[in-house]
Every structure is written in C-alpha cells, then in structure tokens.
Image (cartoon, rainbow, N blue to C red):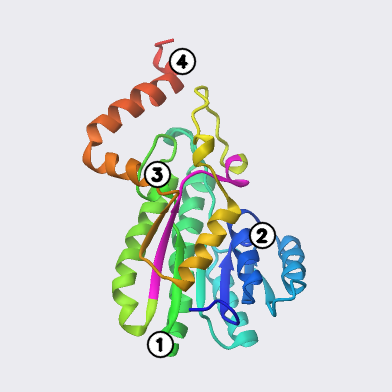
Amino acid sequence: MDPKGKVVIVTGASSGIGEATARQFGREGAKVVLAARRVEKLEALANEIGGMGTGAEALVVQADLSKLEDIQSLIQKTLDKFGRIDVLVNNAGFGRLDWLEKLDPVKDIQGQFDVNVMGVVQTTRQALPVMIQQRSGHIIQMCSMAGLVGTPTYTIYSACKHAVHGFSEALRREVKPWGIDVSMVYPGGVVTEFASHAGIKRKTKATTPKFMLLSADDVGRAVVSLVRRPRAMWIIPWLWTFTMWMNRNFNGFVDYTTINRFTIPEREEELGTK
C-alpha cells in the first residue's frame, strides 16, 4: 500500500512515537487522523502536517481511549471527513513501573488495562467493520518488547502488551481473508516521555544501552515501511531478537541473572540484605 492519499488513524498522536508516526505519514502525503487527549498538541501537529506541501491532510479528534464513546466518536468523525479507514495505528498507551504491591489498584493497574488493552481492542473493533466492507486495511499494533519478555517492575505493563500480542496474533488469522493485514511492532528502549511518566526509580541505574536506544522517528519510519511491506512481527532493533530467544530457550538462566543482578540489588533494604 502506498501511504499517499490513504486515511490513517494514529492514536496517542500528541507526543512520542504517535507524534513521530503521524508526522512520517504526513511527509508521505497521507490523510492523518490525530487522536489523543491533549488537543492543543494535536492542533499544532495538524498545522505542521498541513503545511508540509505533500498534499497531506490532518484531522484532530480529542479522544480518551479508555472510553468507548470517545472511540466510537473517533471512528465516526473519520468516516464523516474521509469516508474510509485504510490504516489504524494503535499506539496510545502508558506505563506505571513499580513493584506490584506498590501500584495503585485503580490508577496504575486498572488504568493501564483500560487504555493499553481495552483501548486497543475497542478501537480495532470499531474500525474493523469498515475495513471488512472495503475488503482492505492494515492494523498496526505498538506492542513493545515487554509483550515478549517480562521483567521486574513491568508486571502490569508487560501483561497488557502480552495481551495485545495474543489479541493481534489471533486477529491476524481472522481478518486476512478480507484483505486486512495485522502487524505487531516490538520496539526496545525509545527516547520519549514514557520514562518520565512511568515513575521509574532504580538504584542500579539499569537501563537500555545507548547503542540500542531508538528515537521516536526510528519507530515512526518503521511503521510507515510496514504499510508498504506488511509483516506479522517486527522487533526493532533486531538485536532484541536474541533477548527473546534467550528468554524462550534459557528461561532459568534469564531468571537467575535478572533476580541476582536487578531484583535483589533493587530490593536489598526491604529484604534486609544490605
């Protein structure tokens, strides 16, 4: 699919990967629907896309993806404006990273499932009949490496992304006969606002090595390239494939290393081992 002139919905478009992805589609001359809660940021991005000189158009839709009525409004406004949906990029999401017993039951646990899982499922559910009627479409899910490898403090975020992985894999096999592709993107560490909102506090300073860090633009370009050449799964950068392989085939070794080099040092005061 050539992105030029295609109608693309990008959720979570007000910052980070969503903003970068929407901008990349604008550069390709797409008709981009920008969905998020922070409407002032969406409007600034829409003005930027409209001024690119590529023939791109942008529609701003304020939407909270934890609310079904907002999702239904997003789909309806897209159809009212453009009459079809060619690509849906389910990017909206957030993380709260801490030990499970310290996470707030509503704000941190239920909140993540509402947006990161139900938001993806419900947005896909609302867009799918349109794509089935068209006999074409592409659904792209921002899954994260947390959807393949679970690590301490990521319990809920990882559970959400594993859920999206399973949902997307099953969906891909449901909708292919209608000419609809489903792709899953698994970025490693990305330089965005995610870390500042996630509340990460680490004594060990453990983080993604700099040489493996991605920019939001890197992921945005990958999403656009998926529209041209669909694939089921894309782990970026490719070196994370080795981590997934180790986790799958040498689970005990990964457990031992993670517990002794991260979990125990991080919790040494609570464990009384300091």
Q: Which corner quadrant of the image does residue 221 belong to? A: bottom right
Quick one: label 2, few (<14), some, or many (20+) residues within 10 Å?
many
Q: Which sits in the foreground, 133 or 8?
A: 8
Instruction: Give the crowd class for mark 4: few <14, some 14-19, many >=20 residues within 10 Å.
Output: few
User: Which residue in the protein does label 4 denote?
Assistant: 269
Per the model, the C-alpha gap separating discs 3 and 2 is: 29 Å
Q: Residue 185 in magenta?
A: yes
Of residues 213 and 95, the one drawn nearer to the viewer in this rendering: 213
Q: Name the residue that disc number 2 marks.
A: 14
Q: Name the residue under label 1.
A: 135
Amino acid marked by disc 1: Arg
Residue bounds of the magenta highlight: 181-195
Is residue 63 among what the camera can see? no
Earlier along the polypeptide chain: callout 2 or callout 4?
2
44 w.r.t. 152: above or below: below
Element class at badge 3: loop
Badge number at residue 239 = 3
The first of marks 1 and 3 along the sequence is 1
Question: Nearer the observer, disc 3 or disc 2?
Answer: 3
**Amino acid type, callout 4:** Glu
